[in-house]
Image (spheres, rainbow, N blue to C red):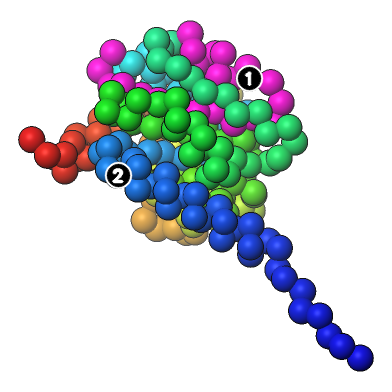
Amino acid sequence: MSVRAIVNVRERVMARNDGFAATVRERLTAAHVPSLNLLSSPGAGKTALLEATLQRLGTQLRIAILTGDVQTQNDADRLAQHTERLVQAVVTGGACHLDASQVLDGLEAVHLPDTDLLIVENVGNLVCPSHWDLGEDAKVVVMSTTEGEDKPLKYPAAFERASVVVLNKVDLLPYVPYDASLAVRNALSVNPWLRVFRTSARTGEGMDAWCDWLASLVAARRTLSPA
């Protein structure tokens, strides 16, 4: 009896995605544009964080944004109110993450010479997006005080692959039974190299430090640009 080898479809799809991600990375590196991939559970406040970011940095940095959502372009519509630049919406139609080919398509509408920073707001999910390279320089996980402190322990892959954690909605700490120090310790136990920001998009607490870090990314990349 003959035997037919079964091709691992997932590995083949991931390899194809990695090829697109490499192209995204090459284009952004050539243009000296740093890029971030924001991950979170639904409702952690990624869009609110970006709204507050655009309010503070929108006139200082030329920020391109691509949003991903399972349905609707509501997040993109919200963000478009805070910038004159095009905010691109990718509606996945049920897929739980963005892939690099979608980001590559999105770059076609971005004039990279007039762009300082690309931020991708991924689909609200801490499982699927963590495994997909979008060509970003860094993954940023946004968690909030309305979630459990054990979020990093339950979804370690997202935190292992991230460079930054933003603990959002800290203005709610007086009103919710949430131990922020424990949450941060849990995150650092998964990945001790994480940079941690504590923010409130509503009150502005911690936003200066977050925005200063974004500006430093742009400044560092500009030093690599030919004079």
**Which portion, as a residue range, is magenta?**
59-81
Q: Is residue 114 visible?
A: yes
Q: On the rendered image, what quadrant is the N terminus found in?
A: bottom right
Vertical placement of residue 193 versus 62, above or below: below
Q: Is residue 196 visible?
A: no
Tell me residue 123's x, y (percent).
61, 35
Q: Classify residue 3 as left or right of residue 151.
A: right
Mark 1 highlights which residue?
73
Tell me residue 47's x, y (percent).
53, 23
Tell me residue 37's x, y (percent).
47, 40
Q: On the rendered image, what quadrant is the C terminus found in?
A: top left
**Do residues under tags 1 and 2 come within 8 Å of each other at their CB atoms?**
no
Q: Which residue lies furthest to the left in this view?
A: 227
Task: For label 2, count other residues whose C-alpha is less than 10 Å away and answer few (under 14), some (14-19) or many (20+).
Answer: some
- Looking at the rendered structure, the secondary structure element under dot 2 is helix
Vertical placement of residue 58 versus 121, above or below: above
Vertical placement of residue 219 versus 150, above or below: above
Residue 112 painted magenta: no
